Amino acid sequence: MAIATNPDSRPANPNFSSGPCAKRPGFTLDALSGAMLGRSHRAKELKARLAEVIERSRAILGIPGHWKLGIVPASDTGAVEMALWSLLGARGVDVLAYESFGQGWATDVSKQLKLADARVLSAEYGALPDLAQVDFSRDVVFPWNGTTSGVRVRNGDWIAADRAGLTICDATSAAFAMALDWEKLDVVTWSWQKVLGGEAAHGMLALSPRAVERLLTYKPDRPLPKIFRLTSGGKLIEGIFKGETINTPSMLCVEDALDGLRWAESVGGLNGLIARSEANLRAVAEWVDRTPWVDFLADDPATRSCTSICLKIVAPWFTMLAPDGQAKAAKQLAGLLDKEGVAYDIGAYRDAPPGLRIWGGATVETADIAALLPWLDWAFDTVAREFAPAQAAE
């Protein structure tokens, strides 16, 4: 095994976390100088800022005009939970679980909501469930992109156009980096902290007319906390979709979201954002193709995520380690990169197989990805000298 030397160049921005994610290129705190702080979020000017986040998001993502789009509490998790608790129970439900968050929604459906007619279609990290088994006479809950597994659905072709149930899509690490098929979706959620690098705690909830109809015609047989309520007196709470948030938003975060959206427009809108993220994936893929010790966690190249790029270590000495040994070696590898200040927060998600997870969303520059890759080789060789000294000396 050749021992990599300490690389000469470093990423200009070493932030490769999968959430909160890197700020957009060129960001400084001066971008937030116009934030309306110390004011009521119900004031006319502040509601206008919140409404601007909604409308700019709608325009960039190409959300149909007849859909409802609102800002909700508790990031993407809050948006998904609001949808699950408010909409499910009218018919059976299929939940697709191929990473930790999808598994979390499956747990909520079966153990918290206790829905009697719930079916979980699971797959191991690195694979998708058999999409042909999904029954669209039922409601369907799924992540478009598995943030912790690096596996995505490529498009909405597998979703029935004449479906009877609703499709509820957790798109938090897909929105703004992948082309969502709005005609095949009914509920879509995301947060500000992912592809646009916004600050956390705020979620977005998009509802198709079919989802709104369900809200108006179905009343769940369970109490709904105020934070989950989308209707009142049998009518949709329209204010939620006009900037009248359920709870108090951070106007500093709102200003940051607007900055990210304006930047997105400046790089070509959705197409530009997708191109930036796909370029990051290509850079990693080219390196993986020539690097024997690493591979993608996603088995099928067509399903590899361009945002949460998950890698597994396939060196023979590593695969022969016990699970705790693998975890220790992978953690040490990520720790070396952190100590050198070249990559922060790129260890695999705690429930995923030991490895690396590099955020490749649109705010990450491909030049920084390219500068990082030699450091991965350096860190691997450094760890190998401790865990497999005989091989490292070859």
Image: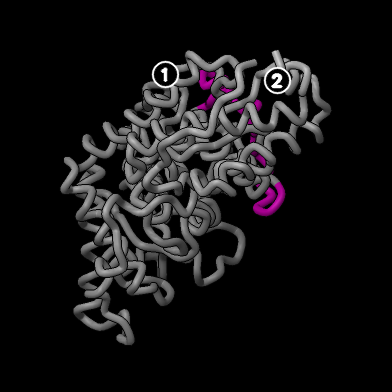
Q: Which residue is mark 1?
A: 286
Q: Does the stretch in magenta take in 151?
A: no
Give 56 or 280, whichever is nearer the viewer. Answer: 280
What type is the residue that disc 2 sits on? Ala
Q: Nearer the viewer, mark 1 or mark 2?
A: 2
Q: Main secondary structure of the magenta part?
A: loop
Magenta residue span: 111-135
Q: Could you tell me which residue is drawn at 29 percent across and 35 percent down?
A: 276
Query: How many numbered marks appear?
Result: 2
Amino acid beneath label 1: Glu
Question: Is 37 positioned to the left or the right of 264 in the image?
Answer: right
Sequence-first tag of 1 and 2: 1
Tell me the residue at 37%/58% (across/down): 198
In this view of the protein, which residue sits in the foreground, 206 or 91?
206
Secondary structure type for disc 1: helix
The figure's colour scheme reads: one colour
- Residue that label 2 marks: 392
Residue drawn at the location 26% of the way across and 54% of the way down = 26
Place of residue 10 in the rendered image (x, y in percent of width and height, measured from the top left): 42, 41
